Image: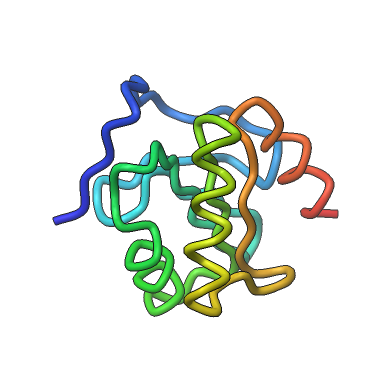
Amino acid sequence: MRTHDSGAQRRPGRPGGVGSAAISRGAVDVLASRGRERVAIEVETGKSDVVENVRQDLLSGFDRVIVVATNETVARRIEHQLAQAGLIIPNRVSVALRDKWPAIACDDAG
């Protein structure tokens, strides 16, 4: 079982961005979709196994995975871990800071 200790309260998503977000009670933190594209959004505090989480998301068939780090230190650590595992995949897997990820998701959704 995958767990995250983000301290964030889960609530239904709102229309916009990469589509209408829906909370997934399974493996991913948030599932966003637009048309046939499915995007896994992982909120990471640095306390979970981000490499395994991203691998599972890709194996589950998600088109994209956005890992949202809670701060810059966590983002650097996650980027390093994913790079070591060969999981920084352009247009498929990306890392963003919590305060900036919506703009990235909207820009990339084009």
Q: Is residue 104 above or below residue 71?
A: below
Q: How many marks?
A: 0
Residue 22 image point, x, y percent: 44, 41
14 sits left or right of 90 in the view: left
Q: Residue sitting at 54 percent across and 74 percent down?
A: 87
Residue nearer the viewer, 100 or 62: 100
Residue 82 image point, x, y percent: 51, 66
Residue 45 image point, x, y percent: 39, 36
Q: Residue sitting at 64 percent across and 44 percent down?
A: 96
Q: Is residue 80 above or below residue 106?
A: below
Quarter residue 5 falls in: top left
- Where's the C terminus, which quadrant? bottom right
Quarter residue 38 falls in: bottom right
Q: Residue sitting at 84 percent across and 46 percent down?
A: 107
98 sits left or right of 42 in the view: right
Q: Is residue 30 above or below residue 16?
A: below
Q: Residue sitting at 55 percent across and 79 percent down?
A: 86
- Where's the N terminus, which quadrant? bottom left
66 sits left or right of 85 in the view: right
